[in-house]
Amino acid sequence: MTVKSAPPLLVITFTLILITLITSCEKFKGDQTNPAYISIDSIYLKTSSSVQGSSSASIVDAWVYIDNNLIGAFQLPARFPVLNKGTHNLKILPGIKLNGIAATRTIYPFFTPIEMEVELTEGETTAIGVQMTNYFSSTVFDLIEGFEGISIALDTTNRSEVALMLTGPGDSLTFEGKHSGMVQMDTLNQFFECVNDKDFVIPFAPVFMEMNFRTNNVFVVGIFLYSTTSIQQVPIIYLNPTNYTWKKIYINLTNSLNAYPGMQKFRIFISAIQTSSETDALILFDNIKVVTRPSQ
């Protein structure tokens, strides 16, 4: 994948995660020389589907704090040493791959932390198993499109040569529910472009787009920016074929939204040109969300 924007605060590279893991295993300083261990199996998302959409998520890391001190970022499932014993406060912040890139990790700013008191014993493992997170109650959902309603919040532009279609109920191509969005291109109809149907105000806050997708053809996700006198189309990320599997992605829109002075509103777009390697291109997507929080 090609990323068009610089990573935000709280992003670290996979190399730094490895350094964290390695240094956490070095000889401890202080009186305690035998560590306790904590294991975490996975973290899942629970949503109120009527107002927050699908609970589909890809939480790949746990950012772990003991008594508000950062221990490290650990790929799930994880088992790691801590130089603590007795009762302590454990806080876990769910982590994602920013823009779908394995080497670029970040805490997702819209998922709530997991907190609990844990009893740690030298040489023993405290297993906390599977944990749950939610969206913060302050999360603003500018867009939720699961392709299940009577109307769809995305529509093709005048330039598009193919229509945005829906998979059928029970179709093996459907990600979840009854329908997913579907785009089919061939050698006669080689260009697709769709945009959401209303403007969003550019906030003074992080903005992310979430999406499940499956594709055998490269496609691009980006934004249209609007001022009172001009329109700017900005591609943000190119998504590569997924080898017939569905993937979840969290796309950071924040930097691109603020890269052009004077712009006030935006919409998202998805577009694709059929590649020469595919006679019949197929792009599927589902659970498209645009999330932010009230401007600070």
Image (cartoon, rainbow, N blue to C red):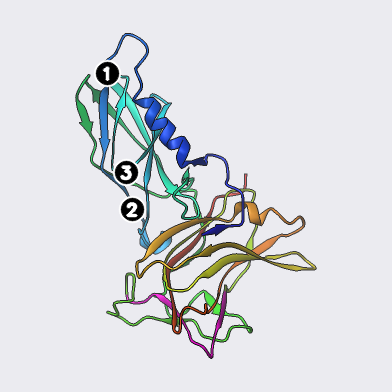
Tell me whether circle 3 and circle 1 mark residues in contact (CB < 8 Å): no
Query: Could one spot residue 65 in this view of the protein?
Result: no
Tell me whether circle 2 and circle 3 mark residues in contact (CB < 8 Å): no
Q: Identify the residue shown where x is 75% and y is 64%.
A: 227
Kindly identify the amino acid type of the residue bearing the numbered disc 2.
Lys
Of residues 189 and 124, the one nearer the viewer is 189
Give the quarter of the figure containing the C terminus. Answer: top right
User: Nearer the N terminus, badge 3 or badge 1?
Assistant: 3
Kindly identify the amino acid type of the residue bearing the numbered disc 1.
Lys
**Could you say where residue 14 lies in the image, as x and y percent from the top left?**
45, 41
Q: CA distance from mark 2 to mark 1?
A: 31 Å
- The residue under label 3 is 76
Q: Which mark is residue 258?
A: none
Task: Kindly indicate the quadrant of the structure image that contains residue 244.
Answer: bottom left
User: Nearer the N terminus, badge 2 or badge 3?
Assistant: 2
Against 246, residue 153 (above or below) is: below
Q: Identify the residue shown where x is 42% and y is 50%.
A: 135
Q: Identify the residue shown where x is 25% and y is 35%.
A: 39
Q: Nearer the viewer, mark 3 or mark 1?
A: 3
